[in-house]
Image: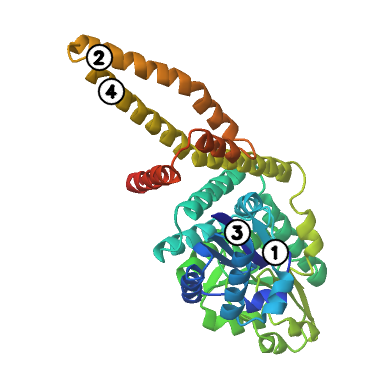
Amino acid sequence: MSLLSIGLSHRSAPVELLEKVVVDDDATAKLLTDLVSAEHVSEALILSTCNRLEVHAEVSKFHGGVQEVSEKLAAHTGVDLDTLTEHLYVHYEDRAVQHLFAVAAGLDSMVVGEQQILGQLRGALNQARSEQTVGRLLGTVADAALRVGKRAHSETGIDRAGRSLVSVGVGLAQSAVGDLSGKSAVVVGAGSMSSLAATELRTRGVGAITIVNRTRPHADRLAAQVGGVALAMAELPDAISAADVLVSCTGAVGTVVPGDLLANRAGRPIFVLDLALPRDVDPAAADLPGVTIADLNSLGTVLEGAAVGADVDAVRRIVTDEVVAYLAKQRADRVAPTVVALRERAQQVVDAELARLLGRLPGADETVTREIRTTVERVVDKLLHAPTVRVKELAEEPGGDSYADALRELFALDPAATEAVARAAVVVEDHDS
């Protein structure tokens, strides 16, 4: 069984397609169940965010797994398979591990270094566990990816990229409407990006900041932090009618700010910064008199250069080191059952030969018997020590599985015995966890 990652994101698909493939929790649960019912898929985890939809799966065959996952995605999103396939990326085995670690570290995000992806991955893992579609392989690699993401943010400054994006966006607003002192701004949403935007607006001297959010306590909290006022979503039309700047960044599926809210301003200028994906603001509103819209598409060049340099290089090194360590451990874990099976086979031989020998020495006392057993076991241990230690070391290198295969062949180990050891190890791990 091998790890397969298949999906589409802002790097492979246009915004219009990404908007069509967003799935909610209920749809995700159904897709998970459908995936693990496929012939070649035994485990599945779905990472669905505003700018990506990915399936991470344990599959028995590469081509069969790719075909089944692609067909399930098309069926559940309603997107034609040919259209979907054109924008899908596929990663397998080692590359799949590297991809998931990079995603968790924020290297693959539209806003490089954003931390929200960690919570989204944790939620995806929890949901898969709740639906019982994730087991030993996916659980292990997802937990490792979460650890990599935490390292990236605790050991580097990669999360400053989001601040750079917001800073540039607010700078464009200042260029469009002039000095922000005394101007009024509305921020829709109360998440991390909205918080960054509200703080940047306050720093630039905006006179009045209004926070609008579906969850009122979250709006109240952010408003208190920036010295603004909080309103319910129902009051958004009135707030927009008096605003000079509108910033929107929610996780909603569908339009949050329809064009008619921006049309009823008698041509008064307003700058709109849409940081959401899918887009919060109706893009057709850009044709309205006095309305200027900047969204993630138009800020593409900023996104490419927002978090380059030492921080990104440091995170890439972290990801590379963690991938190497993870793969080495996985290879070592795969050879461990063979080593255990070999030692068990050796113990069976020792026991059988000692029984035969002691049967010929009926007069041997307990001290002699114990000394004979100790000597024979010591000889066997010494003979097996070097090859078993060395095969574990070699297993950590690429292609190391072949040494375990050689051991099984040379010592004629029963494959069923090795599989039994592996199954027992899983049971022990599950019990301990």
For the residue labelled by badge 4, is the local secondary structure a helix, a strand or a loop? helix
* Residue 306 in view in this figure: yes
Mark 3 or 4: in front is 4
**Where is mark 2, residue-wise?**
370
Q: CA distance from mark 3 to mark 4?
A: 52 Å
Tell me what residue is drawn at x 63 percent, y 35 percent: 397
Q: CA distance from mark 3 to mark 1?
A: 11 Å
Contact? badges 3 and 1 (CB < 8 Å):
no
Amino acid type indicated by mark 2: Arg
| Mark 2 vs 1, N-terminal side | 1
**Where is mark 1, residue-wise?**
89
Crowding at mark 4 (Cα within 10 Å: few <14, some 14-19, many 20+): few
Q: CA distance from mark 2 to mark 4?
A: 15 Å
**Where is mark 3, residue-wise?**
4
Does residue 69 sit above or below 419 in this rendering? below
| Residue 178: percent from left, percent from top | 80, 69
Amino acid type indicated by mark 4: Arg
Q: Quadrant of residue 170?
A: bottom right
**Where is mark 4, residue-wise?**
356
| Residue 308: percent from left, percent from top | 77, 48
Q: Quadrant of residue 7?
A: bottom right
Does residue 173 sit above or below 142 in this rendering? below
Amino acid type indicated by mark 3: Leu
